Amino acid sequence: MGVDPDVFAAAYWSRRPLLTSAADLGRDFSDLLTLADVDELLSVRGLRTPFLRIAKDGAVVEPRRFTGSGGAGAEVADQVSSDSVLRLFSEGSTVVLQGLHRLWPPLIAFADALAAELGHPTQVNAYITPPSSRGFSPHYDVHDVFVLQVAGEKHWTIHEPVLADPLRTQPWGDRAEAVAARAQEAPVIDAVLRPGDALYLPRGYLHSAVALGEISAHLTIGVHNVTRWGAVESALDLVRTLATDDPALRTSLPLGVDLTAPGTTTEDVAAVLAGLHAALDRVDPAAVADRLRSRTWAQVRPEPVAPLAQATAAAALTTDTVLRVRPRLRLQLRDVVGDEVVLVAGRQHRTFPAAQRPALAELLAAGELKVGDLPGLPAAEQCELARRLVVESVAVVPDAQPVHHGGDERGTGA
């Protein structure tokens, strides 16, 4: 974002917006997405909803107006119709490409690398707006965003939040009147973004944008913030489990109970609260942290594997085969319990013989090594362990991984 990462973390992250010019960044974003790429996605990639959304004058257009059957052999009813998109776009509608972090190779790599650096899961949408058209009315998001201007110019207006740090259960529509009123006040940022410019917005900041004299396209990198409330939810999950083990909390209310009578259930509610307090006191903070980690890791997609190539490589590997930890897969090696060791891979827990712990630890520490360099195991067991790690997508054989690219080969821009 054009500032030192430590400065960004201390002064801007989750605190205030930051606008950075292309001149300060020293690059543009053409390696991530271009207008030609957008046309390719809309016309020949067999795109389906919900990967495409269209809006006009702040309202979402019904998908049936721009989708239909894919024709013979592809009779899927919700495939994008490029001619319908052309008509709607020409009439002033904004095109929103959603989930590009799962769809477009340069953005898959970019979003995954950014998520690893931030420690928070990410997603990517693209907004393509006709000349002199407004996309969505003033609103706020419940996640942080990085806006990367790809093409054209767009006038952005940013206002202070009406609710600081909103959660996913607190969308802007629940505060529409307050949002509309705040949007009439003086903005904190009133600027035109041009290709290569970037804007960071913490969740809750109101924003709206208008394209100027030509087609405008920008990427929105959504950051799914890991919050303290996420830890609350994880703790409540554990409390729920512990509370169901309490016979007193499973007791039925009296026969013929009248829930409308004042004070009827006061004693029962007091018993429930006491039971919940007792359950909460039994919750292990380490278990809460582990559940929060699991929920977060489940949202982050590791680098895809090539199933056919990796299966072939696994069957043929030798002690000279190079093994690499699967990029962007979150891994944690747990202490030995009994005669087993647990490897946490994303949200999966895999058990291995305790004797294989030194080999697993060395692979995780090195990131990449030859199968024959796995310590503490004879050659046959080295190959057996390596084969299992590849088949279970914990590790890959680098030479069997293809180069992923979009319409042409480009860098990730990360």
Image: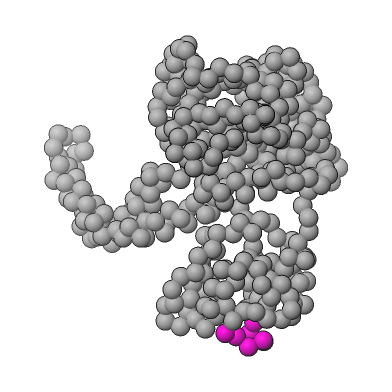
Please give left or right for residue 92 compared with residue 139 in the image: right
The residue at 48%/76% (across/down) is 341
The residue at 19%/45% (across/down) is 269
- Residue 308, position as x, y percentages in the image: 77, 65
- Span shown in magenta: 376-382
> Residue placed farthest to the right in the image?
72
How many marks on residues?
0
Please give left or right for residue 127 compared with residue 265 in the image: right
- Residue 322, position as x, y percentages in the image: 71, 72
Q: Is residue 379 magenta?
A: yes
| Relative height, residue 337 to residue 121 (above, below) | below
Q: Is residue 405 magenta?
A: no
The residue at 71%/35% (across/down) is 27
Q: How is the image coloured?
A: one colour
- Residue 198, position as x, y percentages in the image: 62, 30
| Relative height, residue 51 to residue 314 (above, below) | above
Q: Quadrant of the N terminus?
A: top right
Q: Is residue 105 visible?
A: yes
Q: Nearer the viewer, residue 410 or 139?
A: 410
Q: Quadrant of the C terminus?
A: top right
Q: Nearer the viewer, residue 341 or 357?
A: 357
Q: Nearer the viewer, residue 295 or 36?
A: 36
- Identify the image quadrant of residue 384: bottom right
- Residue 342, position as x, y percentages in the image: 49, 72
Q: Is residue 103 visible?
A: no
The residue at 62%/79% (across/down) is 374
